[in-house]
Image: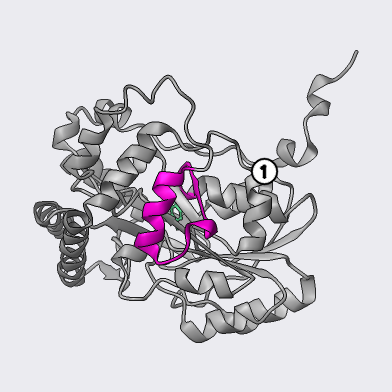
Amino acid sequence: MTDHQALVRPNIIEMDPYKPIVPFEVLSEQLGRPTEAIIKLDANETPYGPCPQAVDALTRIADEMPIYPDPQSRRLRERLAEYTGVDMAHILCGAGADELIDLTMRLFLGPGDAFVNCPPTFGMYTFDGGLVGAQEIVVDRCADFSLDIDAVEGTIRETGAKIIFIASPNNPDGGVVDHADLERLLALPLIVVMDEAYMEFSHAESVAQRVPATPNLIVLRTFSKWAGLAGLRIGYGIYPLWMMDHLWKIKQPYNVNVAADAAARASLDNLDLLLERVERIKAERDRLFTLLHTINYLTPTPSDANFILCDVSGIEAGELKRRLAEDHGILIRYYNKPRLENRIRVTVGKPAHTDALIAALRQIGEGL
Ligand SMILES: Cc1ncc(COP(=O)(O)O)c(C=O)c1O
């Protein structure tokens, strides 16, 4: 009898299952608290939601709903060209930066091809690399989470890796790539992907405007974080023109739906409001950092993003997460894996969220 399962691609049989997030409503049921009584600081979403104009835009797309969307997202790319300062011919939109990571992987990597990943970092690089059957070459970051640029350079020369993925600011520590390190990477014979999902929150400047004159640089951005559109799935990539020719061939024709497109355009039309919120989040990040420093069992890492990674001592990070959720209705992310032993990551919320979190952390600290 045929073993039908043996027909599945071997690299997929060997892949670990993806660990999906628990939906907010399910969590709220598990915790026995209504969603409004939960402070969600676990997924780097904005506490301010989308701008009202984006919500409004969704009420005006009825005519567009029965019709397939523009495969080239022209109207949105025109606005993005103004926002980024890069000609729209370089811009490709997708269902979140996640889709563009996947598409970029599929453009360059086939089974056995090597890519470099520098953990701790965003998990989708490993996930999407596994999906195409590529070989992940891991070069750990230094203790301060900066790139180990000598090791990266050596590894690329030795392995002939085709592409490297770097988040800047990096998730989960919030650090940005050093300018000189980026120059060294760009001088190598490989493609450099700068994932700028959190760039709006950073003091550093985007490298997007360098893309047109840099044949091996890609920049990925998203509306998920600063614009409050994570649920609509809308992001974009900025690519050299020679890559765009191929990307148009391989992307799904209708990957950006009309709702996401309309909300993203409305967001770009209301930058003043959204960027003022970003400024509020940046100010709150600084206040949260100072307050986290006063908790004697936590050591926060300075961050250029909308989250702060903390070293935990005297209590297990998983236990801390559990107590914050069950006793206080505050959700955070915890890690306990190599290079991220006993850490938590806290998303920057509103001032009241910070106050509630700090009060809960103090209360937990009293019992330690
Ligand atoms: C570094 C990084 N890149 C990309 C993404 C995904 O963004 P999107 O929601 O646009 O798919 C995330 C989300 O957490 C992230 O942390």
Residue plotted at (41% across, 40% down): 233
Left or right: 64, with 5 as reference point: left
Instruction: Give amino acid for label 1.
Output: Ile
Position of residue 335 measured from the top left corner of the image (x, y, whole percent)? 42, 55
Magenta part, dominant SS:
helix
Query: Would residue 74 be counted in the magenta stretch?
Result: yes
Q: Is residue 367 visible to us here?
A: no
Q: Note whether 358 is above or below 47 in the view shown.
A: below
Residue 148 versus residue 51: which sits nearer the camera? 51
Q: Is residue 70 left or right of residue 172?
A: right
For mark 1, what is the residue? 250
* Rendered residue at 21%/52% (across/down): 270
User: In which quadrant of the rendered image does the C terminus lie?
Assistant: bottom left
Q: Quadrant of residue 204?
A: bottom left
Looking at this view, is 293 or 274 the one in front? 274
Q: Residue furthest right?
A: 1
Label 1 CA crowd tier, 10 Å (few <14, some 14–19, many 20+): few
Residue 329 shown left or right of residue 303 in the figure? left
Q: Where residue 36 sits: x, y (%)? A: 15, 34
User: Which sits in the foreground, 76 or 293?
Assistant: 76
Q: Position of residue 97 (x, y in %)?
A: 48, 50
44 within the magenta span: no
Q: Which residues are magenta?
A: 73-97
